[in-house]
Image (cartoon, rainbow, N blue to C red):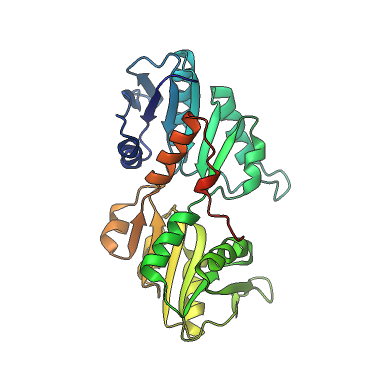
Amino acid sequence: MYGEIMLFTGNANPPLAKRISDRLGLPMGLAQVGRFADGETRVEIGQNVRGRDVYLIQPTCAPANDNLMELLIMTEACKRSSAGRITAVMPYFGYARQDRKAAPRAPITAKLVAELLEAAGVDRVLTLDLHAGQIQGFFRVPVDNLYARPLLYQYIKETLLTKDTVIVSPDAGGVERARALAKFLKTGLAIVDKRRSKPNEAEVMHIIGEVAGKRVILVDDMIDTAGTLTKGGAALKAAGASEVFAVATHAVFSEKAMPRIEESVFDTVVVTDTIPLSARAVESGMITSISVAPLFAEAIRSIHFNDSISRLFLTEGI
């Protein structure tokens, strides 16, 4: 057994790290993470980590390069200080969308990030809703990929579920995710099918499934520019949906996202706190955030005591 649990965080999402530490009943470790005058990342671990079970809580969201470097340098600092085990807790795994060679001379950056983390000294990775499950195979160290499904299921069941609710996938790639949630909630399932009849022509959206007069909930793993999501919502409204909601794990929310969401047909967009929301997102009133802290706190406790974390997955019946 490793020594006591120690938690550290960088500048990516301190509020989430604090929520996790509060759930565990543990203080955050002392770490100074800043910049030298020339912009290089500067890290100082302010307490003894020798033999300890260290968890570095750091999503690699925007600014992705800065946050990734903070994680790598924190890992290096703990490794050189003889930490017993170092777990990178990455609520959002950046660069995950480049997970295959999709074009000639294209990189596979998800693999590169895995190699960088291992080279820095990470012994284990704990993450949530990887964009592609095969990324776990890019590592030679154990990877625990949690799912936000139990949290989203509970929220939808308690807040949004009605007898005429339909779960919708915004594209063909998300059908498995939407189908699993629809099974648990015992709702209907629909799919937004996007097609271009000719190059440079606008997308035509077909709705597969019955949505007229229904409360529909679009389910996705992340919202980046919100283009696909808002177009899908508009297509569902045009097909007769009475109410349109969106639920996603990672609120990437790049520059165009909030204007599109504010002008969209959505009643509410529900996301988790893996990535901190901008002030505009908070003030808009359209975004509801639910915390993943209970999920990560229980996973950290289970890893430390060598317990199974499979009970944290909502998989029965899938």
Q: Is residue 269 above or below residue 47?
A: below
Q: Which residue: 37% across, 72% down?
A: 263
Question: Residue 195: x, y in percent?
Answer: 65, 73
Q: Tell me, yes or no, if residue 93 can be seen here.
A: no
Q: Is residue 272 visible?
A: yes
Left or right of 160 in this view: 125? right
Above or below for 117 versus 45: below
Instruction: Farthest residue to the right: give it.
Output: 104
Quadrant in which residue 59 is drawn: top left
Q: Between residues 186 and 79, which one lies in front from this camera angle?
A: 186
Closer to us: 164 or 12: 164
Left or right relative to 273: residue 204 = right
- Please name the residue shown 61% across and 30% down the image: 141
Q: Position of residue 176 (x, y in %)?
A: 62, 62
User: Which picture quadrant has residue 255?
Assistant: bottom left
Q: Is residue 29 above or below residue 180?
A: above
Left or right: where 130 falls relative to 138: left
Residue 232 image position (x, y, % from top left): 51, 72
Which quadrant of the structure image shows residue 66? top left
**Viewer-proximal residue, 14 or 73?**
14
When the figure is inspected, residue 129 is found, relative to residue 125, above or below; the finding is below
Name the quadrant of the C terminus: bottom right
Q: Position of residue 45 (x, y in %)?
A: 36, 19
- Given the current orientation, which residue lies at the most extreme left position? 283
